[in-house]
Image: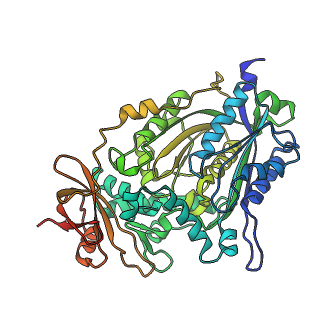
Amino acid sequence: MSRQNLLPVIIGVGQVNDRPGADEPGLDSAGLMLAALAVAEHDAGVSLLGRLDWLGIENQISWPDPAIDETVAAGLPARPGHVRLTADASGHGPMELLNRAANAIGRGEVRIAAITGGEALRTAAKRATGGGMANALAAAAEAGATPLARRYGLVTPADVYPLYENATRAAWRQSLAEAQTETAEIWSGLSKTAAENPNAWLRAPLTPSDILAEGPANRMISFPYTKLMVANSAVNQGAALILASLETALSLGIPRDRLVFVGAGAAAHEPADFLRRDGFTGSASLNASIDRTLALNGLVTGALDHVEFYSCFPCVPKMARRRLGWPADRPASVYGGLTFGGGPIGNCMTHAAAAMVEKLRMGPGNGLIVANGGYATHNHAIVLTSQAPGINPFPQDFDVQATADALRGPIPALLDDHTGPGTVESFTMPYGREGRPLGATIVARTQDGARFLAAVPVEDAQTLAWLAGVDPVGSAGSAEPMVDGRRRWVRGV
């Protein structure tokens, strides 16, 4: 068989938004996945779900089903020969599944494959007591936190991503106003993309001023991020992709102009403990995955017609667009991003891939998807294109960890009991619903470069106001013991 006949193509896409009424139970996660697969089959126009050889499931957190993969497989007309579940619900997972499915097709082992995922956090919140959705998210975050991070309140994504935002702002020599303006421009663009996407969760177009304006509907979540700048996980959403070899797709009678080719991808990761990274001003794994993906596909930035930058928090697309050289005023998403398109935990990029396929069916072009998982931990970039690659790249080794490791700077020692002077490396400051800071955590460096943490108690209003009003990165101070065993940050004079 010709290698070109084994080119992997996407032949069907499906997305589901479940909005149950007050007295309606709503779908669970497996129900969303099966519904999305049915929509994808309908999109392909051919009966496929009883003929799957391979099924990839993006894991979920909203429903208590540790065997969600088997639940979904049992709901199909026939069980696929191979069923794969991602290790956890992480934003890079769908693109890893896509790359693995493409490899299986490229090796000739699989003719028809499917990828699906879904999160039913709205349904879970209704059925649980004591704030089910918040508890599910908090439990997942708490399980992965180290004792030191937990002691200083660095547990949720909203606690951690501001470390990157505040550090990159200083590294890029932006004022707070300049950085917020960049965020507002990108996020306004996301909302406008969502407004044109019938599958987006929120479809009201917003101006940059709307994004920046703080108020009851757009309260500060964690400085400097407001509600309209962060992922919206309060959704019931499912999405699915169906793939086949080129030969199989054509034999099924699927029109050539409906096929979207899967290009090569690249993946790498940062150390799992975000406190044991080289810094917060960039991501070696993000850079390596973007660079290698472009190179593998013979592309440059100017050859890209569409991009999808993972957008859980603004620092991620800001870092990605700088590496790629993508202007802030060009759309950073094809589905509306995690705020407006929807943020179903790890499955967001399945929605993005489905939207990218629909874009590429409208006209010839190339699309780059840059996925992110964990706390800026995992990165997996991949290309989708309307044009058949000249050479079948599959199967391919998408691991570029060695390249990322070579790009990474030295990792500083981490101290858990430092007392004495230091300088601010970054900081995070969560806010309560009433609009006031709940305290802050400083990540600082000693004179010899070691890293340590220090707290700013909620009672220290003067220091909290200072953090929100100036650019404190690089400022001197000291860590002093507190009665609870933590260290307190005291500003230098």
Residue nearest the observer in this picture, 348 or 93: 93
Q: Quadrant of the C terminus?
A: bottom left
Where is 256 relative to 334, above or below? Answer: above
Q: Quadrant of the N terminus?
A: top right
Side of 245 relative to 484 (left or right): right
Q: How is the image coloured?
A: rainbow
Q: Residue at x 73, y 30 (%)?
A: 105
Q: Residue at x 65, y 62 (%)?
A: 62
Side of 150 relative to 127 (left or right): left
**Image quadrant where residue 103 sits:** top right
Residue nearest the observer in this picture, 24 or 252: 24
Question: What is the total number of numbered labels drawn onto the structure image?
Answer: 0
Where is 33 relative to 339, above or below? Answer: above
| Furthest residue in direction left, as rendered | 493
> Is residue 173 something one can see in this rendering?
no
Residue nearest the observer in this picture, 354 or 283: 283
List x then y, in percent, for residue 117.
Answer: 69, 52
> Is residue 343 something one can see in this rendering?
yes
Side of 276 relative to 265 (left or right): left
List x then y, in percent, for residue 282.
Answer: 37, 46
Q: Residue at x 75, y 17 (%)?
A: 2
List x then y, in percent, for residue 182.
Answer: 40, 58
List x then y, in percent, for residue 212.
Answer: 42, 69
